[in-house]
Image (cartoon, rainbow, N blue to C red):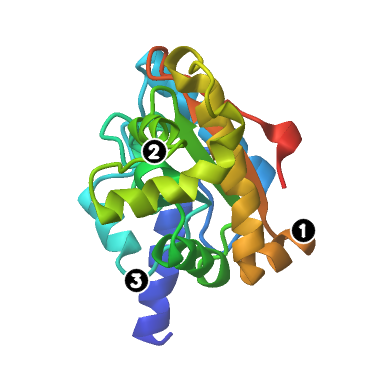
Amino acid sequence: MNMNILTFTVALIMTSLAYANDPHKTKVEKTITAATSLQWLINGNTRFQKHQLRHDGDTHKDVVRLSSGQHPHAIILSCSDSRVPPEVLFDQKLGEVFVVRTAGEALGDNAIGSIEYAVEHLGSQLLVVMGHTACGAVKAAHGTLSGGSAGSPALDSLVKDIHPRIAAFKDKKPSENFEKESWANTEGVSRDLLLRSKILREKVEKGELTIVPSLYDLHTGHVEFKTTKAH
C-alpha cells in the first residue's frame, strides 16, 4: 500500500475512534443540519450554566487536526461585548463555530462578507444572531434616536445601522436591561441579512441555511432562541 494512503487511513481511523463516543462530534465529511447544530448550541449553553464544561477539543492534537481546514457546524454573529464570547457561552471548541462579532451586531460589508464566506465555503447551515441584555450599542442607539452624536463619526455610523430596528422605541422609557430593544435589534439584524445579502437569501430560500435570532441574559447566562421566527 502506498505510504501516503496508509498514513491517511490510519489517521482517519484514529480520528473516528476519538469521536465515536462523543455525540457532539462527527467526521468533517458529514453535513451537519441546522437542527442538529442548534441542539449542540443549546446543550453547550446548558453545560455553561451548570458549570459542566467539556474537557476536549482544545488539545495540540486538535490544533494539528484542524490545521488542514475547518468545518464549523454553525455561524454566530454576536456583539463584541467582552461578557458574551460565543465559544464560551455555548461551550464550543476549536473549529466548531465560525464567529463574527461587532458592537450591537451592527452590519457592514465586512461582517456580511464574513458570514457569506462561511456559508459559501465552509458549509455551515445554521446562522445564529445573538444579542444580549443591557447592550451598550443598543443603549447608545436608543439615546440618539432623536438626534445627537454617539461620540465620533464611526460610532455614529454604527448606531445609525441600529436605529431602524429600534425605531418603535423612540421617546419611550427603555425596558428593563434594554431587553425588548435588544430583541428588536437582534430580530431586525436577522431580517436585514436577507435584504442585504443575495447569497444568504438564496441559501435560505433553498433550505440550505437557517437563521435564528437569540438573546443572551447577562444575569443568568441563558441564551434564549426564537426558533419559531427562524428564517
Do we see residue 18 in this rendering? Answer: no
- Name the residue tied to disc 3: 68
Q: CA distance from mark 2 to mark 1?
A: 25 Å
Q: Which mark is residue 128?
A: none
| Rendered view: 29 above or below 43 | below
- Give the percent coordinates (x, y) of residue 229: 73, 37
For the residue pair 65 and 163, the one nearer the viewer reads as 163
Of the numbered discs 1 and 3, the one sitting upstream in the chain is 3
Q: CA distance from mark 2 to mark 3?
A: 23 Å
- Give the percent coordinates (x, y) of residue 6: 40, 77
Q: Are marks 1 and 3 in contact (CB under 8 Å)?
A: no
Q: Is residue 178 left or right of residue 51?
A: right
Q: Which residue extends farthest bottom? A: 2
Of the numbered discs 2 and 1, the one sitting upstream in the chain is 2
- Name the residue tied to disc 1: 207
- Give the percent coordinates (x, y) of residue 163: 50, 43
Q: Residues within 10 Å of mark 3 (few under 14, many from 20)?
A: few
For the residue pair 175 and 152, the one nearer the viewer reads as 152
Q: Is residue 32 left or right of residue 182?
A: right
- Disc nearest the viewer among 1 and 3: 1
- Name the residue tied to disc 2: 86
Name the residue located 37 percent from the left edge and 50 percent from the top edge.
158
What is the three-letter code of the residue carrying label 3?
Ser
Name the residue located 37 percent from the left edge and 54 percent from the top edge.
157
Q: Name the element at disc 3.
A: loop
Name the quadrant of the N terminus: bottom left
- Disc nearest the viewer among 2 and 3: 2
What is the three-letter code of the residue carrying label 1?
Gly
| Rendered view: 82 above or below 171 | below
